[in-house]
Image: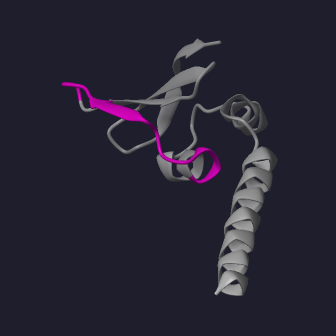
Amino acid sequence: MFIYLGWIVAAFLAGVLLMLWLQRRKPSLQQRVMQMGVFAGRSYAEILKAMDAPQMAVQQTDGRTLRTWRNSDYSISLLFDGQDVCLGVEDESH
């Protein structure tokens, strides 16, 4: 009985360690933004592939969309036209 519990605990701890290791390997949001370089002219699909899903998207009355990516110490908002092509950085804060 105790042998099974030991294996369960060991598997749980191995999973936690693996999760922490993978989390540290992923570049921060700011690093991913720096790697992208210029956003204007890129498609939303291309940006989404590099940066994950935005935390907020606001559809504007003129058909444009403002999408914001944010973490604890950095945020960036990109403006997209009606065809989901990036028009550029609307706001960036550190």
Residue 14 pos. (x, y %)? 76, 67
Q: Among all residues in the image, which is located at the extreme left?
A: 61
Number of numbered discs visible in the structure rendering:
0
State which quadrant residue 34 falls in: top right
Q: Would you identify the image quadrant in which residue 67 lies?
A: top left
Horizontally, is 85 left or right of 73 in the view?
left
Residue toward you, 69 or 11: 11
Location of residue 27 with respect to 91 vertically, above or below: below
Q: Is residue 50 above or below residue 94?
A: below
90 or 16, which lies in front?
Answer: 16
Q: In this view, does 70 lie above or below 85?
A: above
Q: Position of residue 59 (x, y in %)?
A: 26, 31
Locate residue 58, reporting x and y percent. 29, 29
Q: Quadrant of the C terminus?
A: top right
Q: Nearer the viewer, residue 55 or 66?
A: 55
**Residue 20, visible in the rendered structure:** yes
* 47 in the magenta segment: no
State which quarter of the image contains the N terminus. bottom right
The colour scheme of the drawn protein is one colour
Residue at image point 67% right, 67% down = 12
Q: Is residue 52 magenta?
A: yes
Q: Where is residue 13 in the image (x, y as percent from the top left)?
A: 73, 63
Q: Residue at x 70, y 58 (%)?
A: 16
Point 77% across, 58% down: residue: 17
Residue 64 visible somewhere in the drawing: no
Start-end of magenta stretch: 49-62
Horizontally, is 11 left or right of 21 in the view? left
| Horizontal relation, residue 48 to residue 81: left or right | right
